[in-house]
Image (cartoon, helix red, strand yellow):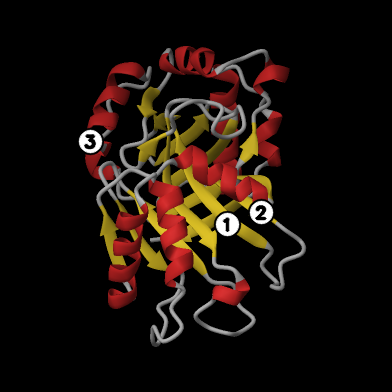
Amino acid sequence: MIMVLLLISCMLLAEGCVDLEKYRYTNVYSSSSINANFEGNNLNLRNVGTLASQHYSVEDVLPTEGIPLENDNILPSLFDNNSTVYLLKVLVPHDNKIFDDEYPEYLTFFIHQNNAEMAWSAIPQSNSNYPQNFVADIVKLSFNISDKKSDQYAEIFGENITTISIPHQPEVRVIVDYLNEHGDSDIQSLGNGNYLIEFLNDSLPYEYKAAGSIFVHTRYLKIIHSTENARYEIRIDGSGNLTAAIHTSINGVSLEDGKVVLKSMFEDIGLNTELVDEMEFGLAVA
């Protein structure tokens, strides 16, 4: 993929082709996620992509796993039909917990295209007080299956006590409604099109006040600019949340010099250059 992007960059950049052997990056300056305020900048994702393609390599990254959301009413309007759900967590009520301790316990669904794997948030030591009725209810709710089938899955889950596969797609709309009844949704942008929706409830008897959570991935644009000693990436999703990264060698571009290039890129794609100064960058060394 990187090879393809670099070849595309050769065609688009005025500087011409870059020696591929020089792309041995050991440092990455990665930014925090901020909002580009599309409304304030009078832009949308298509405008950004069109402007970027005039100067840089542009990749439209789509979700490749999980279950697409059925419609844009399933979660707040910032999510569209190019979204997928990867992970669902549902809090086990205190009186149904396997462990009688101070920590919350969750049923977790790892969602794929054709099935979902169900597991505990932590593997219990035994199933002596296994809450089979609760699990059967959640399975029936989540997959819209019969009482008999949900009881069967709950029994298998109790016997295995680790992870089982359920060959059905969850009814995400129903789970969202369930979680909305047990907490208030709070949306966190994790960058690169990733979002965590937590359903918070201050009345829960735990330090972690979440009745459940959903991990969602949405499509985003990756805008790449390669120079002789660095690669610059801007990732921006349909909600206007963006991150940036500067890939360089130890003796390559400094963060401050890299920010100058990023500001030029922001200007080229029609974004406020001051957004770069609002980002917090961290250094990761390979």
Disc 2: CA contacts within 10 A as few (<14), some (14-19) or many (>=20): some
Callout 3, which amino acid? Met
To which residue does mark 3 refer? 3
Q: Is residue 231 above or below residue 196?
A: above
Q: Secondary structure at mark 1?
A: strand
> Is residue 193 something one can see in this rendering?
no
Residue displayed at 42% across by 71% down: 132
To which residue does mark 1 refer? 212
Callout 2, which amino acid? His
Callout 1, which amino acid? Gly
Q: Nearer the viewer, mark 3 or mark 2?
A: 2
Q: Is residue 100 above or below residue 218?
A: below
Cα separation between marks 3 and 1? 40 Å
Q: Which mark is residue 182?
A: 2
Q: Earlier in the sequence, mark 1 or mark 2?
A: 2
Cα separation between marks 1 and 2? 8 Å
Contact flag, marks 1 and 2 (Cβ < 8 Å): yes
Residue displayed at 28% across by 75% down: 160
Residue displayed at 52% across by 18% down: 48
**Along the line of sight, which residue is nearer the eye, 190 or 153?**
153
Q: Is residue 286 above or below residue 47?
A: below
Q: Secondary structure at mark 3?
A: helix
Residue 2 in percent (x, y) is at 27, 38
Residue 11 in percent (x, y) is at 28, 18
Residue 255 in percent (x, y) is at 57, 47
Q: Earlier in the sequence, mark 3 or mark 1?
A: 3
Counting every numbered tag in the picture gives 3
